[in-house]
Amino acid sequence: MTRIAVIGGGRIGEALIAGLLESGRASKDLAVVETAPARSEFLGERFGIRVTDSVADAVTSADLLIVAVKPHDVDGVLTALGKAELDNDRDQVVVSLAAGVPTSKLEGKLPAGFPVVRVMPNTPMLVGQGMSVLAAGRYAKPEQLRQVSEVLAAVGKVVTVPEAQMDAVTAVSGSGPAYFFLVVEAMVEAGVGLGLSRDVASELVAQTMLGSAALLEESGQDAAELRAAVTSPAGTTAAAIRELERGGVRSAFWEALNAARRRSVEQGTTAE
């Protein structure tokens, strides 16, 4: 079984730990690095795993070193990893979940030739329905990429892309849940405006979104086909779609995602 050290015990780190233990992809010898005492105590009690405040202590016996910290904390983790006893001969791999940090920066602060895999996760990982997108660094072997993919499958779906596409990935799936929640928020507010209670409007929208996503996943049809199937000529849905198109919903999404991609590029340049 793959031995794992998770560096960072925040929400994403906690979600990953829960998924790994529940799926059996990690055993109780999984180690977590967390410096906040209260958070450290919580994780140890909840999962019955070893929690330490020392990066060097956690990584010496691990195969996968998963960096699950905020981008501004990556430098400190890399410095600690550089001082740890990392070993290329043991096929250890650094897996970074930090948004916008390119593999070149990670590789530059690790021992020469050390394998790195960059991951763009998203928050549905918290309920085991995440979308994790992988990009291999220069030295990561295909079997190491497969190993990382199998581990992250514990908390959702996994795809692999060239690193040059990671800024677009960030715009689509990394930031995507926020767009979804904004649409939900707008629909609930509209439902309230039409006379529904907030509780009823919220339940209607949430279940409609959940069911629509399942239909898209399981039907084998694309979104355009499914939309057309609901949109009867001159019907209620057609009237609503006409107003959304008049409001420029497609161009708004294009501009929004393009802005997110540009910002991701800027953050990556700064991280370099």
Image (cartoon, rainbow, N blue to C red):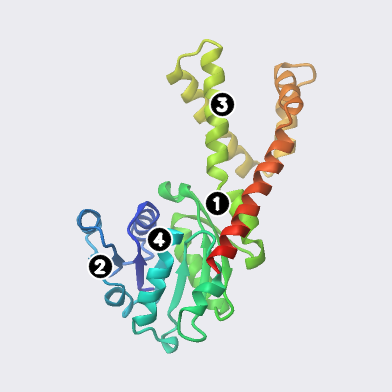
- Amino acid on which the number 3 mark rests in the picture: Ala
Task: Confirm or deny contact between disc 3 and disc 4 (CB under 8 A).
Answer: no
Whole-number angstrom distance, CA of label 3 to CA of label 2: 43 Å
For residue 239, above or below residue 156: above
Q: Mark 4 points at which residue?
A: 69
State which tag comes first along the sequence, 3 or 2: 2
Image x and y of residue 138, in percent: 59, 79
Q: Mark 2 points at which residue?
A: 53
Relative horizontal placement of residue 257, taking residue 36 as reference (left or right): right
Whole-number angstrom distance, CA of label 2 to CA of label 1: 28 Å
Residue at 21 percent of width and 53 percent of height:
38
Q: Label 4's element?
A: loop
Whole-number angstrom distance, CA of label 1 to CA of label 4: 15 Å
Q: Mark 3 points at which residue?
A: 186
- Amino acid on which the number 2 mark rests in the picture: Asp
State which tag comes first along the sequence, 1 or 3: 1
Image x and y of residue 245, in percent: 75, 28
User: Residue 174, labelled with which disc?
Assistant: 1
- Amino acid on which the number 4 mark rests in the picture: Val
State which tag comes first along the sequence, 1 or 4: 4
Residue at 42 percent of width and 69 percent of height:
75
Relative horizontal placement of residue 181, taking residue 238 as reference (left or right): left
Whole-number angstrom distance, CA of label 3 to CA of label 4: 31 Å
Q: Label 3's element?
A: helix
Image x and y of residue 44, in percent: 22, 59
Q: Quadrant of the N terminus?
A: bottom left
Q: Residue 24's image quarter?
A: bottom left
For residue 44, above or below residue 118: above
Q: Is residue 221 visible?
A: no
Number of residues whose C-alpha sits closer than 10 Å to that of mark 4, classed few (under 14), some (14–19) or many (20 or more): many
Number of residues whose C-alpha sits closer than 10 Å to that of mark 1, classed few (under 14), some (14–19) or many (20 or more): many
Task: Confirm or deny contact between disc 1 and disc 3 (CB under 8 A).
Answer: no
